[in-house]
């Protein structure tokens, strides 16, 4: 992709290890998880960082602009503009797209983007009526007004707002929606567990050969992701009970084939040629050739199916087939969701109807997908996943022949999706 006549590049960033809730990062909120990442990345730039974009899906009332709070808490140059963005699980990927659109204009050449999630330290709030009542009590000017306000509290107003991993409109969890998708696309338990097992095996192999060593910074004594399991097997996965559909007898999504609740933060560089020269020469990089964002009707089309519309549009626009893509990095919210995507991408009628293009792409090359593990095995701190998966793709792509391409895809709550086309 070029902004004007300037090519835009993505360069691999750094991230924390990804760990489970109530684990070693339990004392760190989103701010405290983010600061070490930007503190590790910022000194790598030999020259100015022109701006930064950061995001989190689960908000905190203390941070109106999380990106700015992270930057200032990290004691970095206060003259660098910083702003917060959000698009659910696509947050830090969309941050990269936003940065790409801003670079090349004026003197802007280098941006630091990323995201974070602390699923341990989720803030509970007062219900709206209770908040209104409390505000009236606090603002009362004298005892009489305060007493009058106190008397107006009704038992039905005493409610807390507890954030949940659910869609607000439907009131249903991502897993419940994906169970519907799995049933609609006839995705069985066996193939979900097989994909999950493959992800763990590939993630462990990547850990063993040091693939993640220059992508992860140690934090609080943790040096690697906690989720990849060496000892898992199809037998062990097969013994797990359904997590989201426990009553129909047809539930197939389990803790073993779903991404775990995760604490972690991740960053990424976005640059023009000029900005790229400010980074260490050995930093893996790839050109952002094109990107697409898409949305679907969550009531009729499948909550997490938007990438199946976005991917064909990019390929058709660029005259590419599946085999022209050397690397596929597809975010695994659930193994079932990935398998639904593959079936959708191979369905000519579905692609024509949903993406609005003719299917000339061939058979999807599963063997080229997620070679170093995906979110089921590595973890999924919502807003950090985009930067994680892009950095991972960029590093893998860097070891391929020049001119190799990658598709990086993320589905997101609300029926949203984002896809990037990269080339080394």
Image (cartoon, helix red, strand yellow):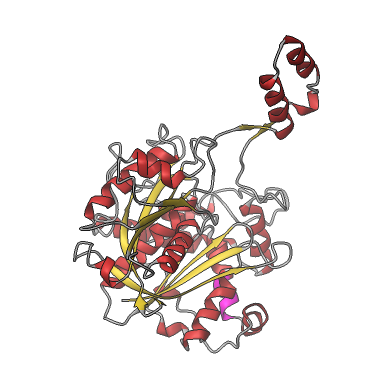
Q: Is residue 343 within the magenta segment?
A: yes
Asked where in the image residue 6 lies, by quadrant, the reply is: bottom left
Tell me: residue 57, above or below residue 281: above
Q: Quadrant of the C terminus?
A: bottom left
Number of residue marks:
0
Question: Which x, y percent locates residue 179?
Answer: 65, 58
What kind of secondary structure does the magenta stretch mostly adopt?
helix
Question: Which x, y percent locates residue 181?
Answer: 65, 64
Write the residue at 69% across / 62% down: 298
Of residue 278 and residue 398, the one placed in the foreground of this image is 278
Question: Which x, y percent locates residue 375?
Answer: 45, 57
What stretch of residues is rendered in magenta? 341-346
Of residue 370 and residue 57, the one placed in the foreground of this image is 57
Tell me: residue 51, above or below residue 152: below
Q: Is residue 168 left or right of residue 390?
A: right
Q: Is residue 293 left or right of residue 251?
A: left
Write the residue at 70% across / 18% down: 140
Q: Does residue 182 appear in this view?
A: yes
Q: Is residue 121 within the magenta segment?
A: no
Q: Is residue 164 left or right of residue 331?
A: right
Of residue 168 and residue 376, the one placed in the foreground of this image is 168
Q: Does residue 190 appear in this view?
A: no
């Amino acid at each position: 992709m070029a902004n004007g006549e300037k090519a835009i590049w993505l360069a691999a960033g750094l991230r924390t290890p990804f760990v489970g809730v109530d684990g070693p990062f339990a004392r760190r909120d989103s701010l405290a998880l983010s600061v070490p990442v930007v503190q590790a990345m910022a000194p790598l730039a030999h020259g100015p960082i022109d701006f930064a974009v950061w995001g989190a899906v689960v908000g905190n009332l203390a941070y109106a602009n999380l990106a700015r709070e992270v930057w200032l808490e990290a004691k970095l140059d206060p003259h660098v503009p910083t702003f917060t963005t959000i698009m659910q699980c696509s947050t830090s990927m969309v941050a990269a797209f936003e940065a790409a659109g801003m670079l090349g204009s004026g003197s802007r050449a280098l941006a630091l983007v990323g995201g974070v999630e602390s699923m341990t330290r989720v803030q509970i709030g007062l219900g709206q009526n209770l908040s209104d009542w409390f505000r009236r009590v606090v603002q009362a000017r004298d005892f009489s007004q305060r007493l009058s306000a106190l008397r107006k509290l009704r038992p039905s107003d005493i409610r807390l707002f507890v954030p949940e991993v659910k869609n607000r409109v439907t009131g249903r969890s991502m897993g419940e929606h994906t169970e519907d998708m799995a049933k609609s696309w006839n995705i069985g338990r066996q193939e979900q567990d097989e994909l999950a097992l493959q992800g763990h095996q590939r993630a462990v192999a990547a850990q063993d050969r040091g693939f993640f060593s220059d992508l992860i910074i140690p934090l609080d004594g943790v040096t690697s992701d906690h989720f990849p399991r060496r000892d898992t097997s199809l037998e062990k996965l097969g013994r797990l009970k359904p997590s989201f559909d426990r009553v129909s007898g047809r539930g197939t999504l389990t803790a073993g084939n779903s991404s775990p609740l995760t604490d972690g933060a991740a960053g990424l560089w976005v640059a023009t040629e000029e900005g790229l020269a400010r980074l260490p020469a050995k930093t893996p990089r790839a050109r952002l050739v094109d990107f697409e964002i898409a949305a679907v009707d969550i009531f009729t089309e499948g909550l997490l199916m938007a990438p199946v519309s976005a991917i064909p549009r990019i390929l058709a626009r660029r005259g590419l087939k599946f085999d022209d893509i050397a690397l596929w990095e597809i975010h695994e919210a659930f193994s079932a969701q990935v398998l639904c995507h593959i079936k959708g991408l191979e369905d000519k009628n579905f692609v024509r109807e949903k993406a609005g293009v003719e299917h000339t792409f061939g058979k999807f090359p599963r063997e080229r997908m997620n070679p170093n593990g995906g979110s089921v095995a590595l973890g999924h701190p919502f807003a950090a996943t985009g930067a994680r998966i892009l950095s991972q793709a960029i590093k893998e792509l860097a070891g391929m022949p020049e001119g190799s391409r990658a598709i990086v895809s993320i589905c997101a709550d609300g029926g949203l999706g984002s896809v990037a086309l990269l080339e080394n």
